[in-house]
Image: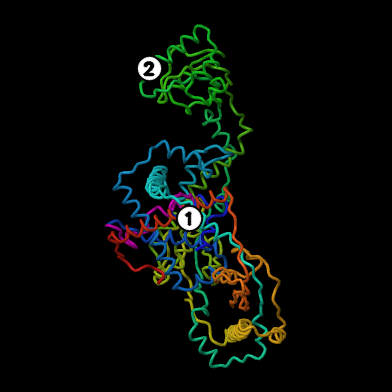
Amino acid sequence: MLEKFREGSQGPGAKIILGAVIVTFALAGVSSYLGGGGNQSAATVNGVDISTQALENQVRTDRSRLESQQGESFAVRWEQPEFQNQIRQQSLNTLIAQHLLQQMTNDLALRIGDEKIRGYIFAMQEFQTDGVFNDERYISLLRQNGMTPGQFVERLRVDFAQQQLTDALVNSEFSLPNEVKQLAALQNQQRELSQLIVPANKFAADIVVTDAEVNSYYENSKAFFQTPQQASVDYILVDMKDISAGIELDADAAENYYKEHLSSYAQEDKRKVAHILVAFNDDESIAEEKAQALLTRIQSGADFAELAKTSSDDTFSGEHGGELDWLEKDIMDPAFETAAFALVNDGDVTTELVRSDFGFHIIKLLAVEPGKVTAFADVKTTIETRLKNEQAVSHFDELAETLAEQAFEVPDSLDVASEETGLTIVSTALFSANAIPAPLNDPRVAATLFDQYFIAEALNSELINISDEQSIVVRINEYKPQTTKALAEVNDEIVARLTAIKAEQKALSFMTSVSVKINAGENVVAELASVDASFTAPEWLSRFDYSKADFKVLRKLFSMPKPTAEQTSIATETSLNGDVTLLKFSSVRDAKINAEEAVRLADTLKNMNAQADYDMLIQTLIKAADVSYPVVNAAE
């Protein structure tokens, strides 16, 4: 428990330990919110279906997260069907919990305002260019993830409402000073230890492993000797780059386009203005009176910038005399924009108040940047690229549509689809799920390739959109299921494992006899000399000194009873690498806690309690819910 506490209490992440509680929305996971994939459901929660497609998306998300955390060890375990089913069930449980939270949120009528959502979207780095929100990037990224702005906003609204619910629960938690003091004392305590480490390989020389033992180990451990499932694939790829490379424009196409769209290359006037804002607040009539009084003072000669500093409700611009950034048309509030562009000369001030959704404005023109027309030579390359892209997109859509139709109409071959589109069928060699070649290594394609239903059907896939520039249809050419390796292939590996196990057992037996003699006060010099081992000098260790002692040894040390003044505590423990350690625990040194650490530990303890509250809420909701499983999950 203290190991988990320590992990949570270190660094800036301590205050956000509730990963499952604080609802976050990652753009990379947008597609997991979309339905699709037919009418099959993986589960039904109080009458609401969880689609199999949503489950597949969640499995991909969870798999990617675990893979990044665990590395190669996860890849080995993923080859086991039992482990895949375990992850699948965990992913389904996550979706069930999300649905239950959403239903509870709806029951409580929790709502989030548009302004908060708008502010959050504008602040998302994924949608920014050079630190500024970019509308084109926003639309493009959403489109790549198969989502409209409306769907995205609604998803955020749901997430924030759920966060509002969970915040109400977890923010009520607290920690007591005595709890913090006790935890700090345990976490920071030091213990004095001498170690006697005996490598297990000291006992391996005379070990014999019989054929019968190898056979028995093999029969009982076949799950560890599996070859991964493999597939070879035929596919047809529609690639925008290939299409663009083959497009040639007419010599005068770019110039004709420039002439037809000349207004697009004409930059209108820009305006630099300053303003004074009087917000509506609770009474619009009072705001209007205040704004009119300010306008009258300006018309009587009062300094505009000084009034902006002292009286404008837009305090940010007010600090700079009301000055705003350069304005272009179709950006600001329509009424504000109309008034600003009606001013003619530098220094002109609107003669009447300007009403917008924010309040009443008084606007002053500071400067005008005249418009200009960009020369054709400066935009020729851009126009040519645009025209090629337009043709490529049109041709891409036509090819993708034809490919989808032909792959569906003749589902047991890609030959006709290839003939109709003129695109080449690509065939791959056999590969496993952990070594998928490009472009098949897209998560959506990979999920299809190793779906057991898809493999069993042996038909063409639907058109899969990898991105805005790539779409693909795939079919299984050859499939080899996961199989158990022959005994002959793994015989040497098993012999090595059994030898290590027996050596560890002998080392442990040896160390146990040594510890018995030490406890009896007998001399063990001869025994230690036989394995060329000796005790290390006593040193003080903390609970997390992994550089000084093995993890299991430290865990054993801090579970041992406190030694008496007359005699040290003795124990044995097998290290992670199989070596055996004799622990001689002699003394305890309590730790002091400073004020800063006390605050950090109190915060972490509060978060841990809050996490427990959240888990209890989910379990309570699940027990009270009507959850059913209409279909058998894939990959079984």
- Within 10 Å of disc 2 (Cα), the crowding (few <14, some 14-19, many 20+) is some
Q: Which residue is mark 2?
A: 286
> Residue 250 occupies which quadrant of the picture?
top right
Q: Residue sitting at 30 percent across and 65 percent down?
A: 630
- Please give the label number shown on residue 179: 1
Mark yes or no: residue 398 visible.
no
> What sort of colour scheme is used for the picture?
rainbow
- Answer left or right for 316 relative to 285: right
**Residue placed most toward the observer, 210 or 527:** 527
User: Which numbered disc flags the more N-terminal residue, 2 or 1?
Assistant: 1
**Residue type pointed to by label 2:** Ile
Give percent across and percent down for residue 293. 44, 11
Q: Image quadrant for the C terminus?
A: bottom left
Q: Residue sitting at 41 percent across and 64 percent down?
A: 90
Give percent across and percent down for residue 235. 49, 64
Compared to residue 507, the image places residue 370 above or below, namely: above
Give percent across and percent down for residue 485. 53, 82
**Residue placed most toward the observer, 318 or 606:** 606
**Residue placed most toward the observer, 139 or 388:** 139
Give percent across and percent down for residue 502. 59, 86
> Residue 88 occupies which quadrant of the picture?
bottom left
**Magenta residues, start to end:** 21-46
CA separation, marks 2 and 1? Answer: 55 Å
Judging from the image, what secondary structure is the residue with disc 1 in? helix
Q: Residue sitting at 48 percent across and 29 percent down?
A: 331
Judging from the image, what secondary structure is the residue with disc 2 in? helix
**Residue placed most toward the observer, 310 or 599:** 599
**Residue type pointed to by label 1:** Glu
